[in-house]
Image: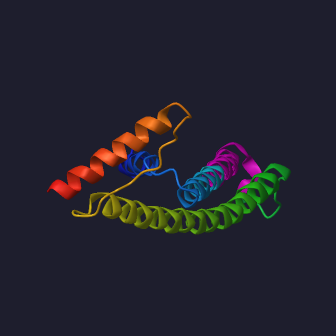
Amino acid sequence: MTEYSKQSAFLKQLMELDQSAETRLLRDRLQTAERNERCVLSACGLVAIIALFGLAGLGYSAVLLRQFFDSQTHVLIRIFGALGLGAGLCLLFWVGLWFYYRGAVNRVREECRRQVTRMLEARLQPGIARHYPVEISGADIFTAEVASAALRSLRKAS
């Protein structure tokens, strides 16, 4: 596991702590951006393999064909040359696209870092009471009223 993927996993774990709609949207955006990046990187790998196949074919043609250095070009030389050149140009395009998607992933990760920082600052600020919503059923209403009355009396006493 690379350092980049370790940082992504840690960021995702921190984002799991916050269940707000904004965080869920950021998680979905991050997941989509990472999936797109992996897809483009796979395409880069496939095109690189095709380009290497074309170059290997040209190399073997240079060694195995007698008329390689003659003025006439053999059909295999044309095929492997076109394959290598086309795949090389496509590889340039896919690598550029991968850089673009990597930048998009980095932008979304930076937004996630800011969101996690805001969430942690809000949770860890001293002196601010946090009241989280609690679902109360019918039988617990009396208990909740007694508990709130007890808290009020404790506050008055201190």
Residue 30, x across and y down, in percent: 56, 56
Residue 52, x across and y down, in percent: 63, 49
Count of marks placed on residues? 0
Q: In this view of the protein, which residue sits in the foreground, 18 or 72?
A: 18
| Above or below for 33 versus 150 | below
Q: Main secondary structure of the magenta part?
A: helix
Residue drawn at point x = 48 percent, y = 34 percent: 140
Q: Is residue 57 magenta?
A: yes
Rendered-image quadrant of the C terminus:
bottom left
Magenta-highlighted residues: 40-68
Residue 90, x across and y down, in percent: 71, 62
| Above or below for 122 versus 150 | below
- 125 with respect to 78 (left or right): left
Q: Is residue 111 magenta?
A: no
Q: In this view of the protein, which residue sits in the foreground, 148 or 47?
A: 148
Q: In this view of the protein, which residue sits in the foreground, 132 or 65?
A: 132
Residue drawn at point x = 67 percent, y = 47 percent: 46
Q: Residue furthest top?
A: 139
Rendered-image quadrant of the N terminus:
top left
Residue 147, x across and y down, in percent: 34, 42
Please tell me in which quadrant of the rendered image residue 98 appears: bottom right
